[in-house]
Image (cartoon, rainbow, N blue to C red):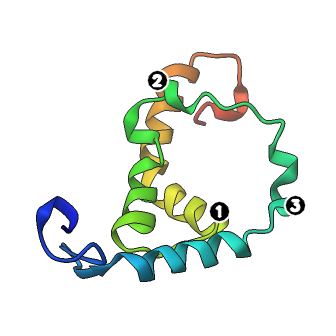
Amino acid sequence: MGIRGEGSVKEENNAYGKRDWMADLKKYEDFLRKINLGKYSNLREIKTVEQNLPKEMLPLDIYYEYYWDKTDFKDFNDVFEIYWEEKLHHIMKFIEKYFMDAPFPSLKRA
């Protein structure tokens, strides 16, 4: 029995055509093997509060699009660039709303 009872377990139709789950799994495993964890070791101590941010600022939709829908496994820097391009206006609105009255001269508009 296939996914949702249709077709084989190996393939499923989606918005991008037929999906070969086994090929996608191999592609994902290959992507994981190539990640240089040492490159990001300095980030281990950083604590995030992203779940408290407005949903418009969260990167989850980008990960779903590239990792799930397209299986285009981009590295952190590529995802960050996409995030920055797509979410910058939301970030700026957030800063204006919560920090423009704060004592941060560098954030205030001239």
Q: What label sits on residue 76 in the rendered view?
A: 1
- Taking the view exactly as shown, the residue that stands out farthest to the left is 6
Q: Which residue is mark 2?
A: 97
Question: Where residue 10 sits in the image (x, y, percent)?
Answer: 31, 78
Identify the mark nearer the N-term, 1 or 2.
1
Question: Where residue 73 sits in the image (x, y, percent)?
Answer: 53, 72
Pair 1/2: label in front: 1
Q: Residue at x 61, y 27 (%)?
A: 49
Seen from the viewer's position, the closer of residues 11 and 60 is 11
Q: Residue at x 43, y 67 (%)?
A: 66
Question: Where residue 92 sits in the image (x, y, percent)?
Answer: 49, 39
Residue type at tag 1: Phe
Q: Quarter-wise, where is residue 81 in the image? A: bottom right
Helix, strand or loop under label 2? helix
Helix, strand or loop under label 1? helix
Task: Report whether 58 appears left or right of 5.
Answer: right
Q: Quarter-wise, where is residue 110 in the image? A: top right
Distance (Cα) linking label 2 and label 3: 37 Å
Q: Is residue 31 above or below residue 51?
A: below
Q: Which residue is mark 3?
A: 38
Number of callouts? 3
